[in-house]
Image (cartoon, helix red, strand yellow):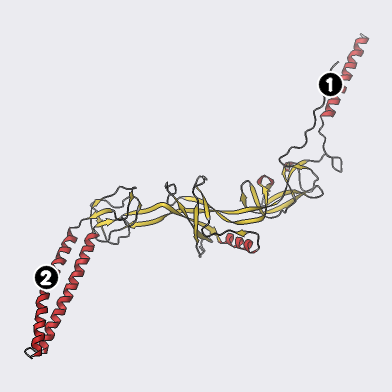
């Protein structure tokens, strides 16, 4: 019994030693601070200056390249509608027909009056010629000659007036066929057959829009323009040639539009209500994907920033006041807090306007384990720290 008890105690002792050895081998080797405490490990990225194309994403609305409101130019009852709503029409196509009967009668009357005026003209001319011969022989008085001359001029004026009346009546008759002023897509009809159409009425009969090419009217704030001009003046941005520049487009759901547009002009007046001004870009629209009134976002290339500071968005946090913050490891290995001024997002990175400079190490991983002023152990972000080797297995006896 005593021998068995000794054997059991020795096994327990060996088992305890093995467990202590395993525990000691399994510890991760970490750098200790001045007080002997283990230093937290953080992943850092060293900031570098790099050239970046500066783009501006601006909200905009689509508008038709051409818009024509169809209105009647004479009064009358609509007798026919000769188009299908939503179809393509060509310039000169007849869209509506106004009852032409009264206008045809007016034309006939004007033509008859002209014929009557022209019928008197040869007799008056001949009479004036004879009076001119008789005046030389004093067979008629000068007054009689003047009267016949005035009658002839009156007849010639009546003929001219009659020709004008005929032309006016012919024009009014042609206006009974209401034609498309431009080619494009016609919308719904705002009037039905049998309704009265009035010349110059405020409501259009229909609207034709040309949308195989469209305009996008984007708005940019005047403050952004001033800041860009200051950066250009300071040489921080190399300007692109804006006029004629190619512009990209994002649809309402964020889908990129496959065709690029061309910048046309920027307005010279700032809207006092919004503090912004208008930029107009023309886009081809062969498949009619872009519809008038659609909300889109334009991506305009403003210039090149040769010495830009970019930092991954995951390395930037915000305090309760909304200020952007980055944690930086200073040359002594301690954490330093920086307040940043952010210009804009470029992909998954922030373009930093102020707060960081090239060569500084920004913490990307391990932010939850640190605070300002504490020393840390750093390793390059996106690469794992060296793995601790596994302890060797103990062979049992």
Residue 354 lies left or right of residue 37; in this view the side is left
| Whole-percent x, y for residue 322 in the image | 65, 51
Taking depth in this image into account, of 357 and 219 the one nearest to the observer is 357
Q: Residue furthest right?
A: 2
Q: What residue sits right under mark 2 in the picture? A: 116
Q: Nearer the viewer, mark 2 or mark 1?
A: 2
- For the N terminus, which image quadrant? top right
Q: Secondary structure at mark 2?
A: helix
Q: Secondary structure at mark 1?
A: loop
Q: What residue sits right under mark 1 in the picture? A: 394
Q: Residue at x 88, y 19 (%)?
A: 14
Asked if 292 appears above or below 157 in the picture, the reply is above
Q: Residue furthest bottom?
A: 138
Q: Residue furthest top?
A: 1
| Whole-percent x, y for residue 7 in the image | 90, 13
| Whole-percent x, y for residue 343 in the image | 63, 54
Asked if 27 appears above or below 159 in the picture, the reply is above
Find residue 297 and name its label.
none
Question: Toward which corner of the image does residue 238 lie, by quadrant?
Answer: bottom right
Taking depth in this image into account, of 391 and 149 the one nearest to the observer is 149
């Amino acid at each position: 019994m005593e021998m068995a008890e000794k054997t059991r105690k020795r096994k327990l002792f060996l088992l305890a030693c093995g467990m202590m050895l395993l525990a000691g081998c399994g510890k991760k080797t970490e750098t200790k601070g001045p007080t002997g405490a283990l230093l937290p490990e953080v992943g850092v990225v060293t900031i570098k200056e790099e050239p970046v194309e500066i783009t501006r994403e601006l909200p905009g609305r689509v508008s038709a390249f051409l818009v024509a409101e169809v209105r009647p130019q004479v009064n009358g009852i609509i007798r026919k509608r000769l188009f299908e709503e939503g179809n393509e029409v060509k310039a000169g196509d007849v869209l509506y027909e106004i009852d032409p009967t009264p206008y045809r009668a007016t034309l006939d009357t004007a033509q008859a009056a002209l014929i009557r005026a022209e019928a008197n003209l040869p007799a008056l001319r001949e009479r004036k010629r004879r009076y001119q011969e008789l005046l030389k022989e004093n067979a008629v008085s000068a007054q009689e000659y003047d009267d016949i001359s005035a009658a002839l001029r009156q007849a010639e004026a009546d003929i001219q007036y009659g020709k004008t009346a005929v032309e006016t009546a012919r024009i009014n008759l042609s206006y009974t066929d209401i034609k498309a002023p431009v080619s494009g897509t016609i919308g719904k009809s705002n009037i039905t057959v049998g309704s009265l159409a009035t010349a110059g009425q405020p409501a259009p009969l229909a609207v034709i829009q040309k949308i195989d090419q469209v305009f996008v009217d984007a708005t940019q704030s005047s403050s952004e323009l001033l800041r860009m001009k200051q950066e250009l003046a300071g040489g921080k941005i190399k300007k692109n040639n804006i006029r004629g520049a190619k512009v990209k487009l994002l649809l309402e759901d964020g889908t990129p539009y496959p065709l690029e547009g061309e910048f046309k002009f920027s307005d010279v007046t700032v809207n006092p209500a919004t503090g912004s001004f208008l930029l107009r870009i023309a886009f081809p629209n062969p498949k009619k994907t872009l519809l008038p009134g659609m909300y889109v976002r334009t991506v305009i290339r403003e210039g090149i920033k040769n010495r830009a500071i970019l930092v991954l968005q995951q390395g930037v946090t915000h305090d309760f006041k909304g200020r952007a913050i980055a944690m930086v490891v200073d040359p002594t290995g301690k954490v330093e807090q920086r307040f940043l001024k952010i210009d804009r997002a470029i992909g998954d990175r922030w373009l930093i306007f102020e707060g960081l400079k090239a060569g500084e190490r920004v913490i990307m991983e391990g932010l939850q384990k640190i605070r300002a002023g504490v020393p840390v152990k750093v390793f390059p972000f996106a690469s794992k720290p060296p793995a601790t080797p596994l302890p060797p297995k103990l062979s049992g006896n």
